[in-house]
Amino acid sequence: MGVLALAAFANAIVDPYRVFALVDAAGFNARKPRAMEQGYLSKLAGVARVRPQRVIVGNSRAEVGLDPASTAWGDALVTYNAALPGTGPETALAFLRDAHREGRLEEGYIGLDFIDFLVGAPPSDTPSAESIPMVADPRARSLGPPQLDLPTRLGLLFSLDALRDSARTIAAQRLDSTPDLTPLGFNPMRDYAAMAKHDGYGAFFLQRDEENAAAYLRDPKFIFVPGTRSSPEWDAVDDMAALCGRLARGCTFVIYPYHAHILELFGLTGLAPSFDAWKAELARRLAIGSHTSAGVPSRSKLTLWDFSGYNRYTCEAVPEVGDRSHVVRWYWEAGHFKRELGDLMIARMRGGDAQDFGTRLPLRDAPTDAPPTGIAAPQSCAGASSAAKLREIVGRLIQQLPRGKTTNSLSSG
């Protein structure tokens, strides 16, 4: 019993998953390199501890790109990043509800990922999918969300795995490359910065391009369950829109700034029509959701921003593999943008002047085959050498597909 008591004491004080928040001391346990091991529980505890007035939800793109402590917000609202890697709109809805139950929530920023809406697509926390290699709680998709109840807390206190992670937490405090999950739920990507310096950004982009191309080519994909005009992901969007209508400041729905490499791959793998249809369906559903139950328009409560187009940020040049001197300013790799770009997104959505970055899409209750104004036909900017490499990757992968299975099978449903 004495050993168990000491283990529980150590786990409570070191708090490797940022659940108990009893001590937060620089050089001892301030950085949490193991927090992603229990990401769902860490974010649940964070929402309850912070009781945010503004919450960010989404997947890993939002977790590493939208900094709740950014000065770009321009106000003093307490902001928490509840985005969780490897999860989709249903988990975003759960965290939005959790934040709302805390009683102080005024507005939400909701990151939406096209890939998460593809019926039959693999979960975005699998090795070949979009999320960077960070560990989300495996129960987030398979067994339903865990709860931060007393048995769960006791399990973390008396866990030998947690004790090992407590030791690792203390040992890693003075390393510049120590991963972290800040008290406000943001992942500053210190470990990725160290890996980029060692391996070069070109290697990161190439690896992710190959993984993305394989995922986009794999099996037929639809934005609706076949035979319907919906899916669990769309139902979650509808529920989020309804909840946002009850918030003082409403919600901003955000389409991520995919790097040009991803946009090019959408075209090369036949996903571009589905991508356009997905944007139009978002605008249509949010137009419906922007009315109160009494039928009175309340459009100021819901907005939809699209940062996915080709521009000087998303078209940032990628260094060659082996080039370790060139630093990519705006991206970690094609799917994950840096906080510097996230700050520009926040400023733009908050009324900034960057007219060449981001478009506020009009909300229109229109058929999905009539994209709203603001969804422009893409023009390539990936660069001749990069575009050739992407075509080579896709061509090689197509040759590996079973006979008769081509990108023609990809459809918007």
Image (tube, rainbow, N blue to C red):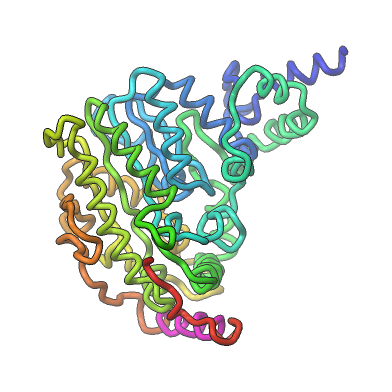
Residue stretch rendered in magenta on the structure: 386-397
Quadrant showing the C terminus: bottom left
Query: Is residue 324 among the parts visible in the rendering?
Result: no
The answer to which of 243 and 397 lies nearer the viewer is 243
Q: Residue furthest front?
A: 227
Query: Is residue 275 among the parts visible in the rendering?
Result: yes
| Coordinates of residue 181 in the picture (x, y in percent) | 53, 36
Q: In the visual, does 14 lie left or right of 25?
A: right
Residue at 43% over, 80% down: 408
Q: Is residue 389 in the magenta section?
A: yes
Asked which quadrant contains residue 10, the reply is top right
Residue at 15% over, 49% down: 353
Q: Is residue 237 in the magenta section?
A: no
| Coordinates of residue 292 in the picture (x, y in percent) | 19, 32
Quadrant showing the N terminus: top right
Q: In the visual, does 40 lie left or right of 381?
A: right
Residue at 33% over, 24% down: 105
| Coordinates of residue 83 in the picture (x, y in percent) | 45, 40
